[in-house]
Image (spheres, rainbow, N blue to C red):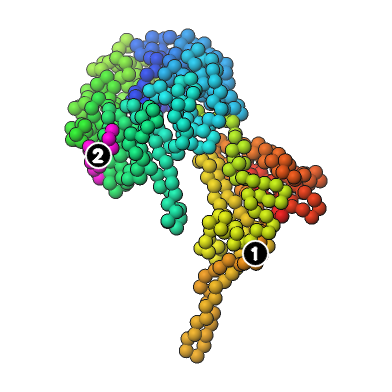
Amino acid sequence: MKINNTRYFALLVFVLVACNKGPDFDALVPYQEKENSYWGYIDLNGNKKIDPKFKNLPGLFYNGYALLEKPDGSFNYIDRKGQEYERNYIDACDFHEGVAFAVNEGEYPVLLNAKLEEVKILEKVDEVRLPCEGFICFKNTRGKWGYMNKDGVIVIRPVYDFAGDFSDGLALIGKTEFDTTSENMKEKSFFGYIDTKGDQVIKPTSKYETISSFSEGLAAYSDGADWGWGYVDKTGKKVIRAKLEWDEVTPFKDGIASVKIGDLWGIIDKKGKLVVNPKFEIPPAFENGLSLGKKDDKYGFINKRGEWVIEPAFGQVILGFAGRRAFVEKDNYFILIDKKGNQKKNREFYQVGFSHFFENSVKSDFFDTEAVIDTFIQRMNAGEINGITPKTSLAEVMKKYRLTDKDLPENSYQTTLEVSKIKMNDEISGTVTIGFNDNISTEIVSRIDEYWYSYNIVTGYKPNNKAVTESVSFSIDLEGRKEAKAEKLAKDLKSVIELNGFKQDKEKKSTDSWDFYTTDDGPKASIHYSPGSVNLSVMF
């Protein structure tokens, strides 16, 4: 989780977050009395509640706790009395529905209860989001999504390639398939909805390019950039047909939604009728009857008829009218105004803000190397790996990996063939390459006769039937947070190699690579790693 400590220019607080609901923070806002001073908290009336004592800009309070990022990048929690709980988590999220998640270094996420107690380690969980309508959406280490209850017990098995939070009693789920009939194996996505029992209410289909969670009985959909956006009901029926001019849309709230036409936003009702013409620079999102509006780089507030109730005159707005008053910036200081735009209490604050609006998920720091190794290496011993031996022919390799002549390199001087591309998730991918004792492509030559002379022309390539395997190589690429785990993966892969009949060559020492042997003339192996990648080669 990355927290931005820079000043907020304008913050549209009522952007829909977890569960398609607005904010439920605990009415305390961080503030500074002067430049470079420590941070404290005031309430929505401007009364000081927690004395300034935090060096870093803290977050908002949810369910009684706020997140605080320490100077070293770790995270602690603060309670409403200002007490800081020294936990030093490497990742943590806000509380919601009485629970939160945090991550200790090198471990899986842990479930926190309302007393800030660590009640359960979520084994084999790679990513987890806060509960919505009582259901916690999570992704396992195999990259599949499912749901658990607030006790951390799985209630809907992780079988989906994508899963959204529950909203209106339904959750958006998706599966990905590859079109094997296309030349480049194009990815195809199928989206549908399940109920709280895990039953399919709307069967997954590929007819939507994009579709959202439900809000007030409607979900936004798009069939592609050339079709614009519309809305479907809970039966999957298109009740508001997509309009090409609607470039973007928002979920429905209080019977209305925002649509972007060109560069400006307007408002529609549940029949798709434009009730306020496009004239706003940011999407209207209402709370307590008012929405933040922007005009000529200044911010004010509008009502549901699109009328300016408070003229745009402020450089920044913090939290909008989440309560009876709003914090706005005027003449380089923050003041409190009421819903008529009048300043209250004649108080000024140097800065009002927060480090983040709402953090609703964490990712595991535990690197499940076993899952990675099992994905790339299914079977292994000193003379065989994944069914490949020194006697495996090129034809057998092509049959095993379902390759055709079109997969051969278009030259007759290449001895290696990339047989498999593997993508476990957005952070782990790789390739499997097999080396042969001879060139793998043989030219298909045709004789061309033209008038008084003739010549040969290469019309394609076919497999060299004399080529047999000589090596198998695995290149595993790590991205994002997994880049720092390359050394751990390499060491665990080293253990697997040694358990399968290989011995490390102690004479060839290196900080980032190892060599292995079986007998003097037997198979050899090598492992090399660098930040973000690990490579294993087995030579027969």
Q: Is residue 233 left or right of residue 180?
A: left
Instruction: State the residue position of label 1.
Output: 467
Q: CA distance from mark 1 to mark 2?
A: 57 Å
Residue 493: image x %, image y %? 67, 41
The answer to whether residue 120 is above or below residue 436 is above
Q: Is residue 238 magenta?
A: yes
Q: Is residue 162 magenta?
A: no
Mark 1 crowdedness (10 Å alpha carbons): few <14, some 14-19, many ≥20: many
Residue 79: image x %, image y %? 48, 12
Question: Residue drawn at (58%, 43%), measured in percent from left and top?
Answer: 375
In this rendering, does residue 181 appear at all? yes
Magenta-tinted stretch: 234-248
Instruction: State the residue position of label 2.
Output: 238
Marks 2 and 1: in contact by CB < 8 Å?
no
Amino acid under disc 1: Ala
Amino acid under disc 2: Lys
Mark 2 crowdedness (10 Å alpha carbons): few <14, some 14-19, many ≥20: some
Q: Nearer the viewer, residue 87 or 5?
A: 87
